[in-house]
């Protein structure tokens, strides 16, 4: 690695960090405004024009707030948990392409990198939940682990089907197209500027969207910090700056999932028509990349607003429904998607066959899920949960015993 | 080159120290988190050996999934179900560990690493190396690959059987 590359990497990281901080601030503002509109309120409107400076004020409040650590917490793990959640959320952005061959680090195995890094965040939630030495955090952490590990599978399988489609793991090939070879045949796969993969793989898009929402732990899948069930989940005992880091990571992940949906299914930075045909040849490569990056951001924000919209309109699932949906519907469906794309490519059928087969399957599965909802309504995991709830207090940090004593003395 | 060496020794030190931590700590949950640290450091060493695919697979499987499942199992079981750390079988465990380590060292020294590398085509850092890995797994090494997946399948069926019988027993 030459000196210039090192300088570029450091400058890129610095720019990324600043840009992402601004993105998180803007996302919190947009979420509050979107939710307010759905609930027929005005939303933040006092600080700055249209409440635009509200996130800044919130950030200042959080930073200056007293940072409390519970007496019985495992101090080291309690302190490390937010880092384990936030650092992967930042690291994912290293591989996200903002233009042709334009990322902080262009990786050959970009798709695999995204999947691998995003998996580490779960450990942070589990760590925070355990170290807080509170039953609500503990339950929340365990719920988070169960949910995130389950929903990671459909995400990985959908990403795998895209890798099969473009015959590469690089994000540039996903957006810019690739020449693929099956056996002796080769065929040119057009870039996503020509056909976004959303049209080839509507089933993949749907699975990715649902599983992505679950990975984020957003309503309707916010089982692990459901206020009415486990108060705040793994974050119950966190306050001030530590809590702010969890919050930051959550919005960063929302932004990542939106960007991934755009990159994998809606063409990322690619243009609907080649830039030459719109502007002639007098457009410099810098301008092309700038407009491409802006195009990516616009689409990402639109998807993010869609995610906020879903949060505003859907109620929360119950935990057994959530797990059953992942294992009985999403995972089999994602395998169907993978096998379908492999068959279509192997027999060299045109790509619209994939769409034509996917749409009836989506419709059928949707109707089946809707009809079985009533019949399968009985909560099935409550018994297991109740049994383990009694045992959950035991493996906590050893000093938690005095709390139990106090509770018993008080009761 | 020197910078690479420094990074390598750093990663190696983290691996060794956290592995020692896994064995020596009395707190099972701490041991699990140290295990995660050790596995991530090993992924770093893979990365330094330009085995990018292996490093990412290590992070994905061991960092993201296996550690979480281990932690999950620890947190959901009663602490008096857990075997005590100062067990009477300690000398035996030590003997087994040293024996396995010696076996690994002997196997590594005895095998011809260079010819293995050229036979599999693995060890190049580009995407073609990753393709060679895939091709090798499904052609030359198909039988070991299938055996490994069969072992996993058997483990899965066994787990389901155990869970089912525990449920029926109540």
Image: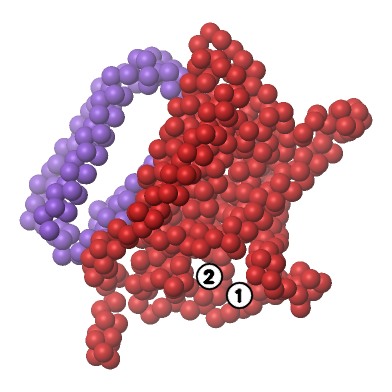
Q: Is residue A264 above or below residue A376?
A: above
Q: Quadrant of the N terminus of chain B?
A: top right
Other-residue count near label 1 (Cα within 10 Å), few / some / many at <14 / 14–19 / ≥20: some
In the displayed structure, does residue A196 sit left or right of residue A358? right
Nearer the observer, A318 or A257: A318
Look at chain A in the picture and name its colour.
Answer: red
Q: Is residue A148 above or below residue A109?
A: below
Q: Which one is earlier in the sequence, the residue at label 2 or at label 1?
A: 1
Q: Chain of mark 2?
A: A
Per the image, the residue denoted by label 1 is A62
Per the image, the residue denoted by label 2 is A243
Nearer the observer, A404 or A364: A364
Q: Where is residue A199 shown, x and y percent of the image?
A: 63, 33
Mark 2, secondary structure of its residue: helix
Other-residue count near label 2 (Cα within 10 Å), few / some / many at <14 / 14–19 / ≥20: some
Nearer the observer, B27 or A369: A369
Which quadrant holds residue A304? bottom right
Which quadrant holds residue A408? bottom left
In the displayed structure, does residue A354 sit left or right of residue A333? right
Callout 2 touching callout 1 (CB < 8 Å): yes
**Residue beneath the point at 45% across and 37% down:** A334
Can residue B82 be seen at all in this image of the molecule? yes
Q: Which chain is purple?
A: B
Mark 1, secondary structure of its residue: helix
Q: Where is residue A223 shown, x and y percent of the image?
A: 44, 62
């Amino acid at each position: 690695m030459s000196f210039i590359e090192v300088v570029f990497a450091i400058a890129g990281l610095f720019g990324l960090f600043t840009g992402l901080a601004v993105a998180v601030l803007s996302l919190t503002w947009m979420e509050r405004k979107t939710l307010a509109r759905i609930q027929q309120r005005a939303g933040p409107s006092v600080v700055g024009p249209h409440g635009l400076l509200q996130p800044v004020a919130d950030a200042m409040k959080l930073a200056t707030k007293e940072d409390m650590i519970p007496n019985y917490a495992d101090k080291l793990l309690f302190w490390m948990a937010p880092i384990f959640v936030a650092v992967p959320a930042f690291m994912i952005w290293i591989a996200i392409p903002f233009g042709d061959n334009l990322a902080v680090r262009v990786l050959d195995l970009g798709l695999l990198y995204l999947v691998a890094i995003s998996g580490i965040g779960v450990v942070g939630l589990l760590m925070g939940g355990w170290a807080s030495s509170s039953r609500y955090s503990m339950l929340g952490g365990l719920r988070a682990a169960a949910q995130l590990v389950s929903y990671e599978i459909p995400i990985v399988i959908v990403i795998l089907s895209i890798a099969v489609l473009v015959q590469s793991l690089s994000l540039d090939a996903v957006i810019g197209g690739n020449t693929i070879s099956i056996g002796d045949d080769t065929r040119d796969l057009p870039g996503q500027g020509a056909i976004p993969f959303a049209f080839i793989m509507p089933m993949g898009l749907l699975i990715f969207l649902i599983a992505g929402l679950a990975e984020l732990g957003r309503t309707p899948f916010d089982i692990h910090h459901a206020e009415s069930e486990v108060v705040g989940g793994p974050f119950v005992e966190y306050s001030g700056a530590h809590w702010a880091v969890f919050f930051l990571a959550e919005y960063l992940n929302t932004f990542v999932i939106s960007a991934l949906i755009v990159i994998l299914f809606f063409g990322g930075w690619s243009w609907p028509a080649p830039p030459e045909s719109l502007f002639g040849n007098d457009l410099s490569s810098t301008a092309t990349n700038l407009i491409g990056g802006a195009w990516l951001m616009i689409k990402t924000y639109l998807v993010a607003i869609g995610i906020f919209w879903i949060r505003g309109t859907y109620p929360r699932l119950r935990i057994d429904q959530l797990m059953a949906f992942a294992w009985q519907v999403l995972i089999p469906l994602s395998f169907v998607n993978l096998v379908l794309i492999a068959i279509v490519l192997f027999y060299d059928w045109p790509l619209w066959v994939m769409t034509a087969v996917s749409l009836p399957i989506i419709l059928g599965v949707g109707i089946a899920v809707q009809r079985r909802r009533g019949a399968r309504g009985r909560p099935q995991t409550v018994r297991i949960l109740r049994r383990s709830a009694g045992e959950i207090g035991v493996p906590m940090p050893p000093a938690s015993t005095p709390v139990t004593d106090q509770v018993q003395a008080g009761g | 080159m020197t910078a690479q060496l420094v990074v390598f020794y750093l990663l190696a030190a983290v691996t060794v120290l956290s592995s020692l931590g896994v064995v020596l700590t009395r707190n099972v949950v701490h041991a699990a988190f140290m295990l995660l640290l050790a596995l991530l450091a090993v992924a770093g060493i893979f990365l330094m050996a330009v085995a990018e695919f292996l490093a990412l697979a290590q992070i994905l499987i061991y960092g993201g999934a296996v550690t979480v499942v281990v932690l999950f199992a620890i947190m959901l079981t009663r602490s008096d179900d857990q075997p005590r750390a100062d067990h009477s079988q300690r000398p035996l465990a030590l003997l087994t560990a040293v024996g396995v380590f010696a076996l690994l060292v002997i196997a590594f020294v005895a095998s011809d690493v260079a010819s293995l590398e050229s036979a599999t085509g693995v060890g190049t850092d580009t995407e073609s190396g990753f393709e060679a890995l895939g091709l090798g797994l499904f052609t030359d090494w198909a039988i070991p690959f299938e055996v490994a997946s069969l072992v996993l399948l058997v483990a899965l069926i066994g787990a389901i059987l155990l869970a089912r019988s525990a449920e029926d027993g109540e």
